[in-house]
Image (cartoon, helix red, strand yellow):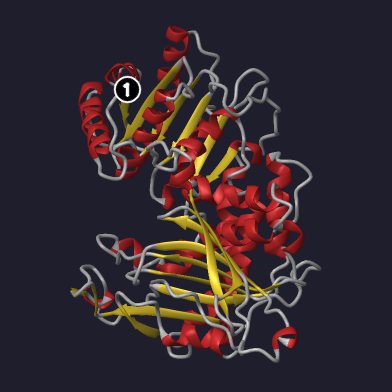
Amino acid sequence: MAQDIEHKTIAHGERAPACSMVIFGAGGDLTKRLLIPALYNLARTNLLPEKFSLVGVDRLDMSDEDFRAQIDAALRAFANDKHYAQKLDEERWTALLSQITYLSGDFADLETFTRLGAKLDGIDKAQGKSGNVLFYLAVASRFFGPVVDQLGKAGLVTETQDRWRRVVVEKPFGHDVESAKALNAQLRKSLSEQQIYRMDHFLGKETVQNIMMMRFANTIFEPLWNRDHIDHIQITVAETVGVERRAGFYETTGAMRDMVPNHLFQLLALTAMEPPASLSANAVRTEKTKVLTAVHPMNAATDSVRGQYGAGERAGQPLKAYRDEEGVAPASKTETYVAMKLTIDNWRWAGVPFYLRTGKSMALRNSEILIQFKRPPLSLFKDTATEELTPNSLLLKLQPDEGAALSFGAKIPGPAIHIGQVHMDFHYKDYFQNAPSTGYETLIYDCMIGDATLFQRSDAVIAGWEIVQPMLDYWADGDKAPLATYAAGSDGPQEADDLLGKEHRAWKKLV
């Protein structure tokens, strides 16, 4: 087992130190659509190392020129995309492109890694670099362990005081508690925990990071952020897309494994965590892990709902049922929707329910966190025309329209006392200029400067799987566990509404 070695820290905003980056799975979609544009944006903003090189590794046999041509086409498509439209900085892109090379080889063959080591040594000698390397596993999860084993055998992840070696592992990190523990044990044979960066691209979004700033940098919120003032919290990650061309992956994964232990639980942890002692990676990650380990064991039968979308419509356009999608089994019981109720056994949150939901082919693409405050007593207004007081709420909007909204009561003009709801609405785009981004820029940069704050630690990964394992076990019995259906283009199944309805609460409408 590798030992942790401390390296010089780089302050945020400074240029990353000289390093090479190796992408395993360089011919895949992730590399072309997200990683290369992210590296270009880092170069454009002078955060990419002055001495930098990229080596793409994949099975397909091609030359450096062939690979550069593919990458060039992908980057130009990114620059022209309506979501990121920007004028390409030809000078910076040409310079970056010249630093990209390719190595073909089989991930199961140690000789591939021996050649990679020789290639990296040659690049370092030519550029006068210190030997820092970031290995990015943009491959299917079944290759995570074997690739790291080969890196270890080839001596490519051995660190010294003056050089670091780091490995980025994309989700999913396991598919249940036991597989996550096994994968972690396999990685730790060659790597120290400090070398492992478990990537959840969702945490690269500015508004997700702003949850901590919203709470801890504003004294108007933090004193209210507890069981005395908050009735419940809703966390929603809704998608309008269906399974599309990912049926092969989705049929063996489902919404629970795909979204809950990573995306949703990271939002839960950021929302519910205690103030960390500092903004250091370990301090923040320790408080997030404490939240997950404090989640009360669930009753899967009463506190969770799984659903699958049937045929429906959106804006008058027909939408397919999940079972009619290409590659999906006609009698598939794979869930495309999950809702659950969680409680946290600590002083701050005792008695406050957290409701989480995520689904595909829903009415609206929307990721948000609703903080629903307690209803004020009516006694002051009992002799007025006001029959009921609407509770205040704070809505943290993560995507697509990033921002926050605070709702509160105000008197409606007129002789009678009626109270209406008004909304203070903040949109990031109105106050700050958002640079074109894939969401990976921050995360890749943090890997290079050695800041692991936005990456999951092994104990948090295991804690997340332990929370959902009772649901996975319950759902594994297809005859016992019900599978709700909901119309594509809707807010989800009725059973999810009933989950809150039995406690006289309701989901915030997506539309």
For label 1, the SS is strand
Left or right side of 112 for 66: left
Is residue 337 among what the camera can see?
yes
Q: Residue furthest left?
A: 317
Residue 335: x and y in percent read 40, 75
Asked where in the image residue 117 lies, by quadrant, the reply is top left
Q: Amino acid at mark 1?
A: Thr
At 78% from the left and 66% from the top, the residue drawn is 348
504, above or below 257, in the image: below
* Mark 1 residue crowding within 10 angstroms, few (<14) / some (14–19) / many (20+): some
At 24% from the left and 80% from the top, the residue drawn is 311
At 62% from the left and 35% from the top, the residue drawn is 451
Is residue 332 among what the camera can see?
no
Residue 282: x and y in percent read 71, 43
At 34% from the left and 61% from the top, the residue drawn is 249
Left or right side of 38 for 267: right
Identify residue for label 1.
101
Which of the two residues, 323 or 442, is positioned nearer the viewer here? 442
Placement of the C terminus among the 4 image quadrants:
bottom left
Which of the two residues, 414 or 150, is positioned nearer the viewer here? 414
Residue 99: x and y in percent read 35, 18
Q: Residue furthest front?
A: 415
